[in-house]
Structure formats: C-alpha cells, structure tokens
Image (spheres, rainbow, N blue to C red):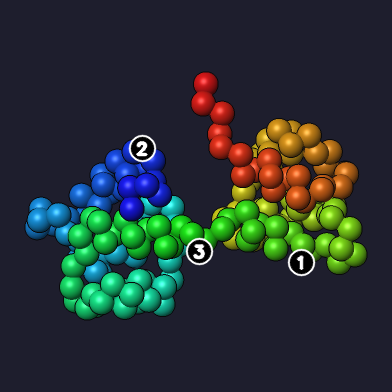
Amino acid sequence: MAKFFTPVQINEFKECFSLYDKKQNGKIDVKDLITVMRCLGTSPTLGEIQRHLQAQKIEKTGEVDFSMFLMMMHRQMKQEDPKAEILEALRMTDKQKKGYIQASELRAKLTKLGEKLTNKEVDDLFKEANIKSNGVVNYEEFTQMVMLPPVDY
C-alpha cells in the first residue's frame, strides 16, 4: 500500500490512526474507522465502511490494523473524486450546456449549499480566479483552478 501514498500522507495517516489506537496495539476498533477516515479528508458512508469491512472479512466488532487501514483508505480515496463531483454539480446548473454559468449563480451555490462559504471567502475566490461578480464562469476552468494545491510559500 505504501506505493499508493507519499511518505507525508502515510505519516499523517499513522498519526491520526494512533490517536484512536486506544489499546496501543497497532489496531483501531471498527467503530472508530469512519471517524478516522473522515478526519483524514475522505467522506465514507456507513455502507461504504461495511463494504470495506466485508472485503477484508472483518467483523463489525473487530479491529483494523494499520496496513488494512491503508488498503481501505486507498479504496476510499480512489472512489472519491472531488473534481468530478464539483463538475457534475456545476453542469447541473448549466441548463444550456454551454460550459458557463453566471457568477451570481455560482456565488449563490457557494454561500447557500453544502459547506457554506462566506461572501468574503467567495470574493477572495473570485478575485483569485479572475471572475467578475457580474460575469460568467467557465466551470471547467474554475474547477481546475480550485483543485490546484495551495501555494506553499
């Protein structure tokens, strides 16, 4: 599994995993699995957790060791694709299927749905993406821009 993750990711996973290793035996309780995975940025549902456990033949009352956890994280991260999810949500807004939506409509979505952004956060995002508040947004380009890793100064 190490070949799928960077050393930095593995260290981050290990650190979080260790916080839930209550018996300090290198394992976490299955009941903590969803919490640990969500703390590390994935969004598994209870059904997905059950499928991960079934695939590894682990009981709901059992424990998961770190190597098994890495396999589950890999499978979960492979099936989650935030870029595709963002694009799909924006495509649904594009009634004419032209690849553009109104900036005002994007602002409404960002401030009223899901993890709501403040108007200031949207202003900053629009400024960084060079979007005029009364203009249109090419949502493929916008999605590409927001998916870039943050600049590390």
Q: Residue placed at 85% from the left, 53% from the top?
A: 100
Q: Residues at badges 1 and 2 in contact (C-beta under 8 Å)?
A: no
Residue 9 point in image, percent of width and height: 37, 43
Residue bearing mark 1: 92
Q: Residue placed at 82% from the left, 47% from the top?
A: 137
Residue 7 point in image, percent of width and height: 34, 38
Q: Secondary structure at mark 2?
A: helix
Query: Which one is closest to the eye, mark 1 or mark 2?
Result: 2
Q: Earlier in the sequence, mark 3 or mark 2?
A: 2
Q: Earlier in the sequence, mark 3 or mark 1?
A: 3
Q: CA distance from mark 1 to mark 2?
A: 36 Å
Is 152 positioned to the left or the right of 16 in the image? right
Q: Secondary structure at mark 1?
A: helix
Residue 87 point in image, percent of width and height: 70, 58
Three-letter amino acid code of the residue under disc 2: Val
Residue bearing mark 2: 8
Q: Secondary structure at mark 3?
A: helix
Q: Which mark is residue 79?
A: 3
Three-letter amino acid code of the residue under disc 1: Met
Is 71 positioned to the left or the right of 41 in the image? left
Q: CA distance from mark 3 to mark 1?
A: 21 Å
Three-letter amino acid code of the residue under disc 3: Gln
The residue lying toward the viewer, choosing from 54 and 39, is 54
Residue 58 point in image, percent of width and height: 23, 75
Image quarter of residue 90:
bottom right
The residue lying toward the viewer, choosing from 142 and 59, is 59
- Residue 23 position (above or below residue 130): below
